[in-house]
Amino acid sequence: MLSLAAALMLGGCSSAQAPKLSVIEARVTEVTQDGVRLEFLIDAENPNEEPLPLREARYSLSLDGDTVFNGFRAPQATLRRLGTQRIMLPAVIRAEDIEGISPTPSYRLSGTLGYVTPGEIADLLFDYRVRRPQAPFDDRGTLDLSELLDEIIAGTQDAPEPSNDSSDPSP
């Protein structure tokens, strides 16, 4: 009986290939005195004849060797068959994590993208955490934060001091 259940499970598992992931761009999208928001654009290519639903991305970002962000995102997308889709992964770096780094830090973005292979059984196995296929990604590069570091430092220095004026101009 156990061998029958195992055969059904194996028979229901697809021989789908993992999507191919390529980080194509790292860009700064917002700078405040609290920190920096980055976006990483990833091309996900589905080499299969069947669509691949994406379930979860887990990733981390390091600057100059120190991890500054860990993220989880549910892409809520399906890779079309034999197609490529662009996925955006955000990362936020707090101002205190930026202090002391070089103006052009090296970065490393690495993680996995979970997906479901075609078939109802594969979907159930994913939901019950029995089989969760993942595709890895890893990208290294350099960010130019030189102007942004000045802006963050200036923003924290330009913040208004709390006023101790207790005079009330109203009559």
Image: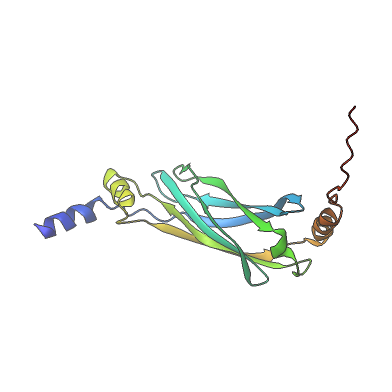
Residue drawn at point x = 77 percent, y = 61 percent: 144
Q: Is residue 155 above or below residue 103?
A: above
The quarter of the picture where residue 93 lies is: bottom right
Give the residue drawn at x 53%, y 59%: 59
Specify the quadrant that holds the N terminus: bottom left
Q: Quadrant of residue 97?
A: bottom right
Question: Residue 70, how many percent across, how many down?
Answer: 56, 60
Q: x, y percentage for residue 120?
A: 28, 43
Callout count: 0
Q: Quadrant of the C terminus?
A: top right
Question: How far from the left and from the top, in percent, is residue 42?
Answer: 58, 52
Identify the residue at the far top of this view: 171
Most foreground residue, 1 or 85: 1
Left or right of residue 152: residue 51: left
Q: Nearer the viewer, residue 167 or 78?
A: 167
Q: Nearer the viewer, residue 82 or 159?
A: 159
Residue in front for this viewpoint, 82 or 7: 7
